[in-house]
Amino acid sequence: MVKVKICGITNWADAKAAVEAGANLLGFNFYRKSPRYIAPRSAARIIRRLPKTIRAVGVFVNETEPAILETARRAGLDELQLHGDESPELVERLSAEFPVIKAMRVRGSLPASQLRRFSKADAVLLDGFDAKQYGGTGTTFDWRLVRRAGLRTKIFLAGGLTVENVQEAITVSKPYAVDVCSGVETRPGKKDLRRMRSFLQAAKSPTKTTVALTGKRSSKAKAERRG
């Protein structure tokens, strides 16, 4: 079953609703220019309350390596998502400490050579291209490109996904996970709970998995999971 990442989480109410609806990963945006920016301390308060089964992903855009690692440790992240123009070398260094999702904005084609440059990433996130913004724009791309590329790495499909098109997107591209942000919002940083639940149900159809909010995660538990 495809996994679902709800990105742009800024408050506990939305995080709790996403988990109860069946989300597998939650994204926290640490890019200061984003309308969905959340401070590491605020993210940490939310992440500490999440079930151990939920992966907390930190989104960074062209940030320095020391700053990424400091934020990741302060917030208690499980994974890093690099959504800017980061180098393969930075991805490789960071992947020694955290699983890294490298985001790529797609327009017109999906060059295999570009994907091979980031072979050290744990997964690749494919997003619609926008010249002015790094993600969260609601821009789609040709999902058929994913299947045609014959990629062997884990693919997160993003960009303009909504309740209305997510099933088609999954059928066409067969991703490891889908990532939604603006498609389930009332405004940047505030989720529409009805659309979020409907999106998760559609993405996980015909069966919908709901994760119970039981147990609080501790630093020790998180360290044991990373092993």
Image (cartoon, rainbow, N blue to C red):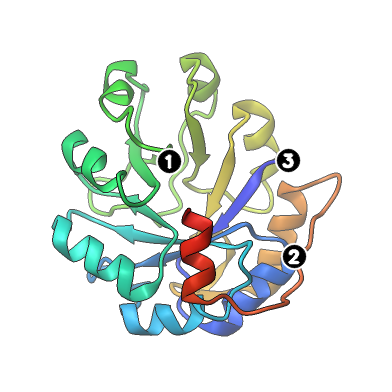
Residue that badge 2 annotates = 211
* Secondary element at tag 2: loop
Q: Which residue is mark 3?
A: 1
Q: Which residue is mark 1?
A: 125
User: Mark 1 or mark 3, which is nearer the start of the sequence?
Assistant: 3
Q: How many numbered marks have been drawn onto this rendered protein structure?
A: 3
Dividing the picture into quadrants, the one containing residue 29 is bottom left
Task: Look at the numbered discs 3 and 2 and tell me whether their residues touch, using CB distance below 8 Å.
Answer: no
Residue at point 65%, 35% (across, down): 170
Q: Is residue 129 above or below residue 174?
A: below
> Quarter of the image containing the N terminus?
top right
Judged by depth in the image, the label closer to the viewer, 2 or 1, is 2
Amino acid type at circle 3 is Met
Question: Identity of the amino acid at label 1?
Answer: Leu
Q: Nearer the viewer, residue 49 or 128?
A: 49
Above/below status of 107 relative to 20? above
